[in-house]
């Protein structure tokens, strides 16, 4: 298989540009946010891997008017998988991992935890992965309200459905079902939110088409989420609502620490631990 140098650069550059677009939009929302505290701004920190090569950008905003904590991270990493990660990839059916453990990956990962309990938390990521014998895309987005509004859920899913339908009429149903399964928490017997879409190992044999789909998923995020955050950021809430939010964040933390594939991969491949664990909420509680 070719090195795909040009394709890898194209993907990494686009994920970086998406990161820039989203952070600018979130800071704009902070400027319009309620209250008299200063509008939040992202703290930007370069990240590096402990071994091999590459790194990224960790962008985290804390204590804003709208966002209690939000991270928008971009990375481009490469090197050799350690034996445990190599075995996990081989078990997933990635060809040639027993012969050549080299890899390259780039993507964007986002998690937002909101100040107002009426506003939903959200997660989004898109990524490309390359090995000497395979390449694929993955990603998706899911909404995690502690207080659900059906109209918000419908809007979020409608935007993701439109992104899917532009490429394959079967994608939405397939990737929604995948998200429902992937974001389910077995030890709680429930989902962590109201779902969205999730896909991985996407390789139809047409790199340009698969990348175009991944771009459309990433581009659908702001139209899917930003109107919900803006509509709910100044809504009235009670201390009981805040308690509900903190308990729900505990559920979110449990999932990310116990089950999330990206968290496990990031830690096993030596990426910056703070960047990998950016998804964890600033405050949570358990009952």
Image (tube, rainbow, N blue to C red):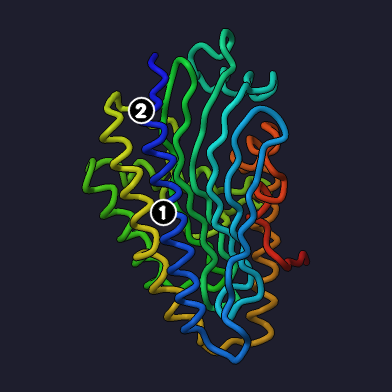
Asked whether, in this view, residue 272 is left or right of residue 1, the answer is right
- Residue beneath the point at 35% across and 43% down: 214
Percent x, y for residue 271? Answer: 67, 39
Look at the picture and state if 134 lies above or below 269.
Answer: above
Pick the quarter of the image with the C terminus.
bottom right
- Residue beneath the point at 65% across and 70% down: 62
Q: Secondary structure at mark 1?
A: helix
- Residue beneath the point at 41% across and 54% down: 18
Look at the picture and state if 192 lies above or below 232.
Answer: above
Look at the picture and state if 254 lies above or below 199.
Answer: below
Q: Secondary structure at mark 2?
A: loop
Tell which of 82 and 253 is nearer to you. Answer: 82
Q: Which mark is residue 223?
A: none
- Residue 116 seen in render: no
Asked whether, in this view, residue 139 is left or right of residue 99, the answer is left
Percent x, y for residue 201? Answer: 43, 30
Q: Which mark is residue 18?
A: 1
Look at the picture and state if 121 lies above or below 140.
Answer: below
- Residue 70 seen in render: yes
Tell which of 272 and 196 is nearer to you. Answer: 272
Residue at which label 2 appears: 203
For the residue carrying disc 1, how many other residues have a C-alpha within 10 Å: few (<14), some (14-19), or many (20+)?
A: many
- Residue beneath the point at 44% across and 62% down: 22
Is there CB contact under 8 Å for labels 2 and 1? no
Distance between the alpha carbons at the discs numbered 2 and 1: 22 Å
Percent x, y for residue 229? Answer: 46, 74
Pick the quarter of the image with the N terminus.
top left
């Amino acid at each position: 298989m070719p090195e795909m140098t040009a394709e890898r650069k194209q993907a990494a550059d686009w994920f970086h540009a998406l990161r820039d677009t989203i952070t600018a939009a979130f800071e704009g929302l902070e400027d319009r946010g309620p209250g008299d505290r200063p509008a939040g701004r992202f703290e930007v920190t370069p990240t590096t891997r402990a071994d091999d090569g590459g790194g990224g950008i960790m962008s985290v905003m804390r204590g804003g008017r709208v966002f209690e904590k939000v991270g928008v991270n971009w990375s481009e990493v490469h090197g050799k998988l350690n034996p445990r990660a190599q075995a996990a990839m081989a078990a997933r059916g990635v060809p040639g991992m027993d012969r050549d453990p080299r890899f390259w990956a780039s993507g964007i990962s986002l998690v937002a935890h909101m100040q107002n309990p009426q506003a939903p938390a959200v997660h989004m990521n898109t990524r490309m992965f390359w090995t000497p014998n395979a390449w694929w895309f993955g990603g998706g987005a899911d909404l995690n309200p502690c207080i659900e509004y059906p109209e918000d859920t419908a809007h979020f899913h409608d935007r993701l459905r439109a992104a899917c339908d532009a490429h394959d009429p079967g994608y939405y149903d397939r990737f929604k079902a995948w998200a429902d399964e992937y974001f389910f928490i077995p030890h709680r017997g429930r989902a962590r939110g109201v779902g969205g879409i999730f896909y991985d190992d996407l390789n139809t044999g047409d790199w340009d088409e698969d990348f175009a789909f991944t771009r459309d998923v990433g581009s659908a995020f702001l139209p899917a989420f930003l109107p919900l955050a803006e509509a709910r950021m100044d809504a009235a809430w009670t201390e009981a609502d805040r308690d509900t939010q903190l308990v729900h964040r505990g559920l979110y933390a449990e999932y990310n620490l116990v089950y999330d594939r990206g968290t496990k991969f990031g830690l096993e491949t030596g990426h910056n631990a703070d960047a990998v664990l950016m998804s964890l909420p600033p405050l949570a509680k358990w009952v």
